[in-house]
Image (tube, grey):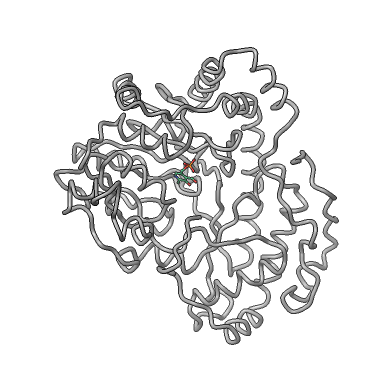
Amino acid sequence: MITDFPEAPLPLLDGTETTAELAEFGGDPVIPKGLRRTVFPVITKEDTFHMLRSQRSSPEKVVEEFAERYRSYVGAHSALPVASGTASLHMALVGAGVMPGDEVIVPAFTFIATAQAVVAAKAVPVFVDIDPHTYCMAPERAEAAITERTKAIMPVHVHGLPADVPALRGVCERNGTVLVEDASHAHSAGIGDSMCGSLGTAAGQSLMADKNFPLGGEGGIAFFSSDEAHQRAVSCLARNGIDYRMSWIVASFGTSQLQRLGYYDAIRARNAAELSRALDETGLFTPPYVPEGYTHSYNMYRIGLRPEAVGLEDLPVWKVKEAVHELLVAEGVPAREWQNTPIPCHLPFTHRHGFGNGYPFTLNPEAARDHTPQDFPVVRAMLESTLVLCRELRSPVEHERLQRYAAAFRKIAKRPDAIRTLVNERNYPRPPHQEAARLG
Ligand SMILES: Cc1ncc(COP(=O)(O)O)c(C=O)c1O
């Protein structure tokens, strides 16, 4: 049973945490064992009551009510609630007018579903590198990849930071393509007053349990900027007899959880700001970059490394990363990799079996390319030099826990000698690990 409360309170900090011996070498971990679990998502009694009450209504109405409330929150023209984020992206592409054999430009760094949704729409994903600061699709790389058969550009607001939509819109306008957002990490994120999900011709968004707006298990929603786009998606489902419907249980959780989304967003933003301040002071660690006027939703918080700031510039950065990873985990901070190779190096895109006989890749063989990680130097550099925190910043993470995460980073940054020792003792492999591509 997941409850609103952790099993026991974390002790308050006493100031000795950052000077104690590293846990890796026998000291006390900053987060004691047994107090490391992060409770997420939170299901409250309001959610349960709302679900029980909604049994009196018809399933269609429960789903409609959720979709309408969330559409209005996002500020999109119309919405289509579906069973998963992947289904929502498929519908967003179809709604935007993507046809079999078309090319859709996607970033080489995302979750594999972004590109798989393109294949589901019978189109061919064309992968491009990312921007070194935002980690989102690089607009100039997208423009360079456009051909006569490019129908759409699909940026991902990766980690929760909106992609450079103004520049990408310019690319679309200059080249007669449409913009389709993958807003799966970007609930409540936006640029100025506009929220992700309302920035393109269409958008897809996952609402599965590990997202910032997690409904009951699996779910997704597509957004459209016109009735025409919406209708194209709805007709595709009807014509082909595809059941992508959202479950009413998921929808009823969505309606009640939407009331708490703003609160959760505020806690996460506070936690991220506090951790960013702490990382800035360490020298070794760098916080995520957020351009002026952009709202980051921190579905993931990617931490960079500057070995040169602590005299470790002679070591390969990926080895420093592996050592830091080991030290953080020993302190009880569940930092991890998220993705370990560019998406085009995952098996579905190296084998390209598709739906059988290579379909839909065979519709446009020119666009379907063999890639190695070296084709995406910025993705590769990011994978080699960064780690992520995921649910560690999300409500109901207590302030004490966050302070302890910050203390663990401070503690490790003070010990370049320990990092060097681990690098010398261990035989860390160099990412990306092509043979062992992980999905998440
Ligand atoms: C960027 C991105 N796009 C799409 C998806 C697919 O969503 P789902 O798992 O709900 O199908 C995910 C899911 O984790 C994701 O992270």
Residue sitting farthest toward the left: 148
Quick one: 429 or 61, which is closer to the camera?
A: 61
Residue depicted at 47% across the width and 33% down the height: 195
When the figure is inspected, residue 300 is found, relative to residue 307, above or below; the finding is above
Quick one: 18 or 249, which is closer to the camera?
A: 249
Residue depicted at 42% across the width and 67% down the height: 381
Q: Position of residue 149 (x, y in %)?
A: 17, 43
Q: Answer with left or right where residue 91 lies relative to residue 304.
A: left
Q: Answer with left or right where residue 285 lies relative to residue 79.
A: right
The answer to whether residue 432 shows anywhere in this view is: no
When the figure is inspected, residue 359 is found, relative to residue 236, above or below; the finding is below
Q: Position of residue 357 (x, y in %)?
A: 23, 51
Quick one: 270 or 367, which is closer to the camera?
A: 367
Residue depicted at 66% across the width and 52% down the height: 392
**Residue 57 lies in what quarter of the image?**
top right
When the figure is inspected, residue 131 is found, relative to residue 105, above or below; the finding is below
Q: Answer with left or right where residue 281 lies relative to residue 181.
A: right
Q: Answer with left or right where residue 283 lies relative to residue 184.
A: right
The answer to whether residue 407 shows anywhere in this view is: yes
